Amino acid sequence: MSELKFATRLNSFASGANLYWPDLQGKPSVLQMIARAGKVKGLTHLDLNYPQHMTTDIKTMRQAIEDAGLAVNGMQMRWDAPQFKIGAFTNPNPAIRREAIELTKRGIDAGREFGSTLMTLWMGQDGFDYCFQADYKKIWEDAVSAVREIAEYAPDVDVSIEYKPNEPRAYSIFPNATTCLLAVEEAGCPNLGITLDFAHVLFANEIPAYAAAMVARRSRLLGLDLNDGWGKRDDGLMAGSVNPRATLEFLWQMQRDGYKGAYYFDTFPDASGLDPIREAETNITTVLHLLKLCEKLHDNPALLDAISRQDAVASQQIVNDIMFAK
């Protein structure tokens, strides 16, 4: 367990800023959020949004992260500028589309300076809102060719697509595991893979462990966003808080397929003003507990036999005995 990497969303540490920094005027700085993240027991890494978090020079940020006892797990692209509202990689304006691609390359370059070799692409702006708005074949080709160009730019970096059914667009270009697997296959680059966000998977009406198994079968699971939700939107609740059994199966499936990456918490304590330090520590404790339960599931002959027979009653009894043991 000591070698596990636990990472989290830096913006979480703006939650309850007025209580943590009583004299603060406005929002906390990136450096302040980094220092606060360093207070979380068990946290080892952060993910940084690019270019959103690049508010000071990289050397200063790198030192602040080191002083907090943390490292950078990966970079996450954010195309927040107004020109990208109707698309980054699928923007109808070739100049804006090129700007999005080049910005992503700069994000990869920045990640290298932080010692990271993972770039996550959540392409929230790429999609459509209306019938008769988009040429579907063209925007698909634009998205896939952009991902291919970025992957070819950095063969030493893992480039991972994170899907979500919608938001901010009414319908995303990559809304589910199937479309991501198709895009990765068409792009044809060995350093491409997929990030599974637990709440996004639920939102897509998918079973998380099944999605993980299909990704492992046809591609690589490069990233994991642990959280939870009610499946109606991207809730970003604490890991295992709504669907503990599905979370357990998800982690078990990933381990069976050899996942070695970070356990990254994409949760939103800031949405309801939770203490982000306590919230992150609870996430870590929950996952450590579930991973210990996974050890009891591994090579469990009775469970494997029940699964081989698709005997749901037997498998539920076995898992119940493990989850609810006194």
Image (cartoon, grey):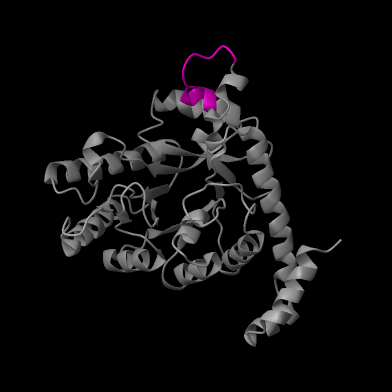
State the residue at coordinates (30%, 43%): 104
Question: Which part of the image, by quadrant, shows the C terminus?
Answer: bottom right
Residue 176 placement (x, y as % from top left): 39, 63
Give the residues in magenta: 22-33
- Vertical position of residue 47 compared to residue 66: above or below: below
Determine the residue located farthest toward the bottom in the rendered image: 309
- Nearer to the camera, 20 or 30: 20
Identity of the residue furthest to the right in this view: 326
Q: Position of residue 142 (x, y in %)?
A: 20, 56
Q: Nearer the viewer, residue 221 or 286?
A: 286
Which of these two is toward me, 65 or 254? 254
As drawn, the residue found furthest toward the top would be: 23
Q: Does the rendering let one see residue 67?
A: no
Q: Is residue 28 magenta?
A: yes
Residue closest to the eye, 203 or 227: 203
Q: Position of residue 234 (x, y in %)?
A: 47, 50
Residue 1 image position (x, y, % from top left): 70, 52
Q: Image height check: is 57 above or below 138?
A: above
Magenta segment, principal secondary structure? loop
